[in-house]
Amino acid sequence: MRPISRRGVLSALGLGVVLGVSGLSVSACSSNDNALDPRVDEAGVNQVFVAEAALLAGAQSLSKARAAVVIHQAHLDALIAAGATTEVVEPKPITSLTQLAAAQRKQAALCARVAVGASPRIARLLASIAASNASLASVEVAS
Amino acid sequence: MSVLDRLQLALAGEHAAIYGYGVVGGRLTSKSGRALTNLNAHRSARDQLSRLIVSKGAEPVPADPFYAVDISAGTQKQLVTTAIAIEDRLSVLYAELMLENDASARGIAVEQLQGCAVRATQWRSRAQAFPGLSQVAPAN
């Protein structure tokens, strides 16, 4: 997977974007309600975005993780709408549901950590994504 | 709404959840062990919230003596649906608590939102994209 440049794709103008990234299809419409506070949130949101893209790629590579694909895609959409402006780089491969669950738990912890210090709307979104990843991990472990 | 208001709302939600799980857990023929585990998790969350409210100089809201829990159909499916509703409603309260710029409140909210979401997922056997959020939910 080649790196892609997404800088400026979602500006404050509120434009929607559709990206194609070697199997990653990331689409979103922006939301002014989730306007990014660049002083506090940008680094955290971008960090979460990169990890979420890796989770999507991992889930896409596993035939039994179709529900996770839909959810991770939705997370990416929301993060773009929230102002993620990072680049997606080639993630480490995920080859089993157990690995996927471990990565989802790690992502839940990252989201939770970033959420506590973020601006209110970003904090709420990241807390929800953290909860979703924790839930996904519990499902992957059970399956 | 102040952070104390939101903490009190979450506490009131936990009181209701504890009552609700008492009703549901006593009627489930299977998975009653899960209901008991969840009941204890909500008791723990209640105590955590109460301590934080006291530390902020306020009196924690008490539990009501009675909560309306619809078990009219008397089916196991309805009991599970009620358990899911308990977790989903609390998820919203914890997500809204994240809107407050208070690190201790957010610490509880982010932890408990995960707990609610995981428990709801166990009941419904599938995860949701945005637990606690109603306006961002293409995959919910």
Image (spheres, helix red, strand yellow):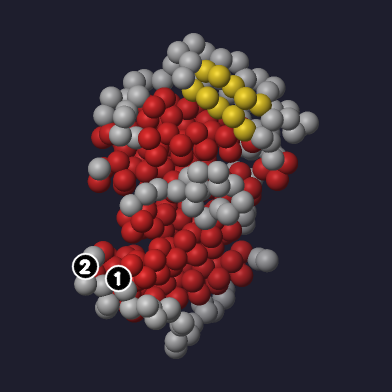
* Residue A132, horizontal then vertical, whole percent: 44, 46
Query: Residue A143 is drawn in which quadrant?
Result: top left
Quadrant for the N terminus of chain B, please: bottom right
A94 vs A119, left or right, is left
Name the residue tied to disc 2: B30
Residue A19 at least partly seen: yes
A32 vs B130, left or right, is right
Give the number of marks.
2
* Residue A41, horizontal then vertical, whole percent: 62, 37
Q: Amino acid at mark 2?
A: Ser
Where disc 1 sits, the SS reads helix
User: What residue appears at the point 53 percent right and 33 percent down from the top-left corner?
Assistant: A76
Chain hosting mark 2: B
Work out whether A134 lies above or below A5: below
User: What residue appears at the point 49 percent right and 52 percent down from the top-left corner?
Assistant: B131
Q: Are marks 2 and 1 in contact (CB under 8 Å)?
A: yes
User: What residue appears at the point 39 percent right and 81 percent down from the top-left corner?
Assistant: B72
Query: Residue A19 is drawn in which quadrant?
Result: top right
Front in this rendered view, residue B76 or A51? B76
Name the residue tied to disc 1: B76
* Residue A127, horizontal then vertical, whole percent: 51, 48
Where disc 2 sits, the SS reads loop
Residue lying farthest to the bottom in this orientation: B65
* Residue B133, horizontal then vertical, whole percent: 56, 53
Residue lying farthest to the right in this orientation: A13
